[in-house]
Image (cartoon, rainbow, N blue to C red):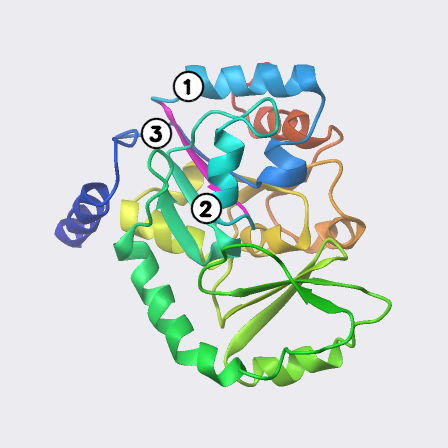
Amino acid sequence: MADANAASRSQFSSQISGTLPERPELVLVMDLDGTLLGGTLAQRRQFYSWLEDRRDGVLQIFSTGRDLAAVRSLLGGDNGLPPPTPHLVIGDVGSTVACGLSLETVPIAVDPIEAQWQAVQPLLDGHLEGVAGLSPQLRNVERRYAFNYEPQVFDTAILSRLELLGVDCLLSDERFLDVLPAGVNKGTTLLRLLDLLDLPHGQVVTAGDTLNDLAMFRTGLNGVMVGNAEPKLRALHPELENIYLAEAHGCGGIAEGLRHFGLDCPV
């Protein structure tokens, strides 16, 4: 088993640019919008500096609904204060895994998801065209369909019919609908990534603010629900094990949660 773990980590490492922390003291998995990109300007500056200073000891993973093009724009400074470049990116709500440095996909992690999507995508043809209250997002999404929806108009009854075709339908933030291969989400992709890298679960902390982060919070890993989390996610907090509900918003909430879990984060 040890040989197999070493082989998978070696293969993973050979498919990315740069190096990962060999024995990270922390694996920090962060949603972007509303989470790492949230909080006051002062909080973001201080927290981003903390991340930069601990790059050799903290394995930093973005876990986002953004596609890689949107992540690239973010890191290029489109929002005025870009966060530090992560080691890895889980994008497209769990259907993409990429190197943070090059933003090239990692085949050992992505190929199984791609095969699953190729099998189910043709079955969806015609089911999502002209649906009232539903409009495609103008993004270069991979291995999923992404839509904006109007809660007062969109009939959610269609979702159960779609799921019979072999997909999962994820509503979040009262405006987004993602259609993904069944079983693919931020949580399952993260657990697969931890297995590939042979990383202990006890060193992981996740952080998020919307329902598309719920799958991460249901993994059993330690997690931080930031203070500005959407109401439907906050309502589920009592049933989630190992998830700390922060008072502070955005990256201030991440820092608050890290301190709750006994980690040194002075932000």
Query: How far is the residue under mark 1 from the one under mark 2?
Result: 24 Å
Query: How far is the residue under mark 1 from the one under mark 3?
Result: 10 Å
Residue 31 visible here: yes
Q: Residue at x 38, y 22 (%)?
A: 55
Quick one: 169 or 132, which is closer to the camera?
A: 132
The residue type indicated by label 1 comes to Arg
Comes first in the chain, label 2 or label 3? 3
Which mark is nearer the camera, 1 or 2? Answer: 2
The residue type indicated by label 2 comes to Leu
Which segment did they paint magenta? 57-64
Circles 1 and 2 in contact, beta carbons < 8 Å: no
Q: Quadrant of the N terminus?
A: bottom left
Q: Residue at x 52, y 51 (%)?
A: 220
Quick one: 139 or 22, which is closer to the camera?
A: 139
**Could you tell me what secondary structure mostly forms the magenta stretch?**
strand
Q: How many marks?
A: 3
